[in-house]
Image (cartoon, helix red, strand yellow):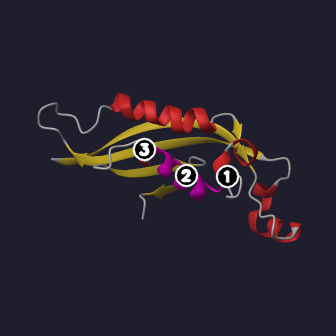
Amino acid sequence: MRLTAYRKAHFNAAHRLHREDWSDEKNQQIFGKCNNPHFHGHNYDLEVGVTGEVDPETGYLIDLKILKDIIKEEVEDAFDHKNLNKQVPEFANLNPTAENIAFVIYNKVKAKLDPKYDLEIKLFETERNFVVYRGE
């Protein structure tokens, strides 16, 4: 049997959407209030989905405690109450859009998972705005 198990998580973080190679006017035009030079924050909600075959002996796809620990170490501890632009090395040269945050989370979690699993990251920047990344 093949299925997907999910674990939810949450973190709060600040960021600024900005490109150094663009003028202030272009940054403001493209990113609007998200380009605030004093940053702004979000209460991010995260859903991590792991897909694979259920082990017939244990009845588990994955021990969700393992997934919980990976998410805590790789996402919550790394991002929670941080300024993504200034305190998270992955965003030193990567604009911390929701799309790029989901991409970074995917790579951090995938590196800790058994490669037999497929992974899906669903990141909510607000309750109405979210992105999904599956490594494609």
Q: Amino acid at mark 1?
A: Phe
Mark found first going from the N terminus, 2 or 1: 1
Query: Please, is residue 38 above or below residue 56 in the view?
Result: below
Query: Can you identify the residue that label 2 sits on?
Result: 104
Q: Residue 84 placed where, x, y %?
A: 69, 45
Q: Are marks 2 and 1 in contact (CB under 8 Å)?
A: yes
Check disc 3 and give the amino acid type.
Val
Q: Which mark is residue 48?
A: 3
What crowding class fits label 3: few (fewer than 14 Cα within 10 Å), some (14-19), or many (20 or more)?
many
The residue drawn where x is 30% and y is 31% is 63
Q: Quadrant of residue 79?
A: top right
Q: Is residue 108 magenta?
A: yes
Q: Is residue 53 above or below residue 27?
A: above
Residue 44, x across and y down, in percent: 59, 42
97 horizontally vs 131: left or right: right
Label 1–label 3 contact, CB within 8 A: no
Query: Which residue bears the numbered disc 1?
Result: 91
How far apart marks 2 and 3 lie (CA) works out to 13 Å
**CA separation, marks 1 and 3?**
21 Å
Q: Residues within 10 Å of mark 2 (few under 14, many from 20)?
A: many
Residue 111 locus on image (x, y percent): 44, 46
Magenta-drawn stretch, dominant element (helix, strand or loop): helix
